[in-house]
Image (tube, rainbow, N blue to C red):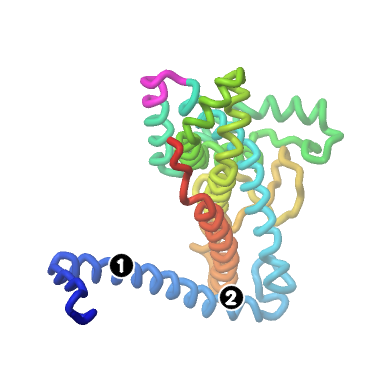
Amino acid sequence: MTSATLSTPKAKARLGDRVFSASTVVAGSLILATLAAVAIFLVVQSLPAIFAKAGTLPNDAANFWTYVWPLVFGTIWAALLALIVATPLSIGIALFISHYAPRRVAQSLGYIIDLLAAVPSVVFGLWGIATLSGFVQPFYTWLGANLGWFPLFAPPISGTGRTILTAALVLAVMVIPIMTAICREVFLQTPRLHEEAALALGATRWEMVRMAVLPFARSGIISAIMLGLGRALGETLAIAMVLSPAIVVKFAVLQAQSPNTIAANIALQFPEATGVSVNALIASGLVLFVVTLLINMLARYIVNRRKAFSGAN
C-alpha cells in the first residue's frame, strides 16, 4: 500500500469555521490599519511644527523640542510619582485579597477594586479639586515648614493644594485597579506546592509570601507597573482639572506652578489653537504616542516571558 493510501483524509472545513477565521483576520487587520493610519496622520501633521522657524511656535519656543521638553518632563514626572504611591498599595491589596482575606471579603473587595476602573476620569478630577486638594493642603504646609530644605518640598507652598503631587495622587487612585487586578491574578497562579512546602518547613505566612509568591510573580508585578505607567501617561481630564500648569521643568512637588503634561496641554490648548500651534499640539501627541507604545510593547514582552505558568497547581 502506498503512503497516499494510508494518509488520513483532512476534515472538510465547516462554514462557521471559515466565517470565524475570516472575521478574526479582518478584525486583526483593522486594528493594524487603524494604528498605521493614526501614526501616519500624526507624522504628517507634525512635520510643520518639527521644522518650524523660531518664534512661530507656542510660548515663543526656539524649536519644537524646546517646546515639548517641559511637557514630556511633566508627563513622566507625574506618572512616576503616581507609580511610587500606587505600586506598594496595589501589591499590598492584591496580596491581601489572594492570601490573607477570607473568601467572602476577598470577593467583595475584588469587585470594589474592579469597579474603580469603570469610574470616569472626570469624576476623579472633580474629587481631586473639591476634596483631595483641600484635604492635603495643610499637610503640604507642614512639609514645607519642616522639610523645606529638601528640594522636592521647597517653598513657596501652594495655597490651594492643586500641585503636581495632588495630580499624582489622583493618578495613583486611577491606576490602582489595573495594577491590583494583574498582581492578584499573578499571585493566585503561584504553584500551591511551593506555598505548602514553605509552610511545611516552618515559614510564617509572610515568609511564605516573600520566598514563594513574590519571586514567582516578579515579572507579573513588573508588567503591572508598566501597564499602570502607560495608563498614567495618557490621562487627560483628571490632570487638566487638578493641575495648575506652567511651562516649567522642576522637581518641586508642592508649588503652585507645576509642570504640565502632554495630554492635559492638548486638552486645554487645542480649542483655541490655530496655524502652527495646532501642528505643535499634534506633534506633542506624536511624542506621547511613541512613548506609550514603547511602554506597552515592553509590558507585553515581559508578560510573554512568563506566559506558561507552572503546572504544579
Residue at the spot of label 1: 27
Left or right? Give the position of 273 relative to 32: right
Judge by depth and name the residue closer to the eye, 214 or 244.
214
Taking the spot 42% from the left edge, 26% from the top edge, the residue there is 109
**Element carrying mark 2:** helix
Q: Quadrant of residue 82?
A: top right
The spot of residue 274 in percent (x, y) is 53, 72
Q: Is residue 140 above or below residue 260?
A: above
Crowding around mark 1 (Cα neighbors within 10 Å: few <14, some 14 to 19, many 20+) is few
Amino acid type at circle 2 is Val
Q: CA distance from mark 2 to mark 1?
A: 36 Å
Q: Are marks 2 and 1 in contact (CB under 8 Å)?
A: no
Reading the chain from its start, which is encountered first: label 2 or label 1? 1
Q: How many marks?
A: 2
For the N terminus, the quadrant is bottom left
Residue 242 inside the magenta-drawn segment? no
Q: Which residues are magenta?
A: 101-108
Amino acid type at circle 1 is Ala
Residue at the spot of label 2: 276
Left or right? Give the position of 59 relative to 129: right
Taking the spot 55% from the left edge, 40% from the top edge, the residue there is 217
The spot of residue 273 in percent (x, y) is 54, 67
